[in-house]
DNA sequence: GACTCAGTAAGTCAAGCGACTTAGTCCCGG
DNA sequence: CCGGGACTAAGTCGCTTGACTTACTGAGTC
């Protein structure tokens, strides 16, 4: 029964529900198009300032949503890094970029909102930097990039950085587009998240292995 | 008839200035974060309904901005198609995707706002479809995709569609990121638009040529 | 059994919003 | 030189927003 809840647990429960509601509304209508009021009301809070009370500004709320998914992603990526340690197969390392998000999205079931939320948060001028920094700064992400660098010593640093950015953009927006198509019932190029992952892997492998033209 | 030229010209001038102002504000703060009022005021219009009067809804305004750049892009792409007619070099056809936007952005000078505007418009749930349809539907774009299809007969239709989408995403968001970095004065992987174009070309060539794993 | 305090309910307020109206102004065809 | 239609100025109205305040609740503390 509800009576057995401690007040801390009750608060955390509310916070969690606000986060889930906000993620959904943000994914559906865009981060800027949703007011704190709407979130509070949709989360069943009579106080329209509930979001402000629990999270502060909208940027804080967005960051809280990002951090809500961070541990799961970190765990998946760290696990993969452990199993491929020392591998010289480029595909293994690119998989460390692609698989954590695709598998995480699959585990969320349908409908999910995370991919669309991230795509919009990383495109919004006011949120972009803080969200990207938060995701790229994780230890497993740093290790993955280091692994790619080790495997592609021929690439100039600028090209490596460029292709790293491209990989991030591609993964985020391809996943978001697929999630949206799933939700709207429109056809997708690939039938499952696993298949979409393979499509991304193939494409990114080609992208990273492509010869580069120097522009110095 | 032509007799109303001056009146019309004045109106067109205002319309044009509103479009340029809206494009800038949208790029800086996000489409949803900017009100019609702010645009009207920033464009020096005393009537806060000026945007509504000239363009209607916000979606109409966004479409008008897209169409403002469409002829220049179409012309560049059509010209390229004419010069490479019959080419069997994949790089030529991918260049028809990449060069029109990069050269257009270069021609706009600094600061430009178009790339960031497009990136946000194509990510916004409410505008996405209409903007993408508008850009993909152009004759030269259709011809380019047809050319790529002719050159890559081995690729299953789904993979071709997938890589087509990936190309679009990559071009849009890489250009937007570069434009933003230029505006903020932060370092960019490539020094010029021409160099960025080559980076995109290299990457997309690898992406399109990559072997594919069937997921049937 | 009174006290504390995190959390929730409910309401307030100025500012800003979209949508609209009214009152001009300007140019040109007649 | 007048009338009509395209355009702009200025203001209005009802509603939503973020930020805030006040009052209440109920679990844990003493």
Image (tube, coloured by chain):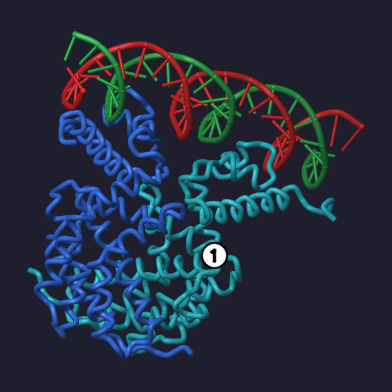
Chain colours: A cyan, B blue, C red, D green
Q: Describe residue A1's horizontal placement relative to residue A206 as left or right.
A: right
Query: Please, which chain is the residue tagged with disc 1 on?
Result: A
- Whether residue B75 is visible, yes or no, is yes
Q: Give the number of marks.
A: 1
Of residues A152 and B204, which is closer to you in this image?
Answer: B204
Residue shown at the point (23%, 85%) measured from the top left: B151
Element marked by disc 1: helix
Instruction: Establish if A66 lies above or below A193.
Output: above
Residue shown at the point (53%, 71%) measured from the top left: A105
How far from the left and from the top, in percent, is residue A106?
56, 74
Instruction: Establish if B150 lies above or below B113.
Output: below
Instruction: Establish if A24 lies above or below A186.
Output: above
Answer with the quarter of the image where residue D8 lies. top left
| Residue identified by numbered label 1 | A184
Label 1: few (<14), some (14–19) or many (≥20) C-alpha neighbours in 10 Å: few
- Whether residue A150 is visible, yes or no, is no
How far from the left and from the top, in percent, is residue B5?
16, 33
Instruction: Establish if A93 lies above or below B196.
Output: below
Q: Describe residue B9's horizontal placement relative to residue A109 as left or right.
A: left
Residue shown at the point (52%, 62%) measured from the top left: A114
Of residues B22 and B73, which is closer to you in this image?
Answer: B73
The quarter in which the C terminus of chain A is drawn is: bottom left
Answer with the quarter of the image where residue D5 lies. top left
Q: Describe residue A205's horizontal placement relative to residue B147 as left or right.
A: right
Answer with the quarter of the image where residue B25 lies. top left
Of residues A111 and B153, which is closer to you in this image?
Answer: B153
How far from the left and from the top, in percent, is residue B147?
23, 79
How far from the left and from the top, in percent, is residue B46?
32, 22
The quarter in which the N terminus of chain A is drawn is: bottom right
């Amino acid at each position: 029964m509800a009576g057995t809840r401690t007040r801390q647990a009750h608060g955390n429960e509310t916070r969690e529900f606000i986060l889930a509601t906000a993620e959904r509304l943000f994914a559906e209508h865009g981060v800027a198009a949703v007011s704190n009021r709407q979130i509070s009301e949709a989360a069943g809070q009579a106080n329209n300032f509930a979001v402000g009370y629990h999270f502060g500004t909208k940027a804080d709320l967005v960051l809280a949503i990002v951090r809500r998914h961070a541990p799961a992603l970190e765990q998946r990526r760290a696990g993969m890094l452990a199993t491929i340690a020392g591998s010289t197969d480029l595909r293994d390392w690119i998989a460390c970029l692609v698989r954590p998000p695709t598998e995480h999205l699959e585990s969320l079931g349908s409908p999910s909102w995370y991919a669309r939320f991230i795509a919009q948060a990383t495109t919004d001028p006011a949120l972009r930097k803080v969200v990207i920094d938060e995701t790229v700064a994780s230890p497993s992400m740093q290790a993955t990039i280091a692994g790619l660098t080790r495997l592609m010593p021929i690439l100039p640093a600028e090209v490596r950085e460029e292709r790293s950015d491209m990989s991030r953009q591609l993964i985020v927006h391809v996943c978001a587009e697929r999630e949206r198509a799933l939700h709207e019932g429109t056809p997708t190029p690939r039938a499952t998240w696993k298949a979409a992952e393979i499509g991304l892997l193939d494409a990114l492998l080609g992208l990273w292995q492509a010869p580069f033209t120097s522009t110095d």
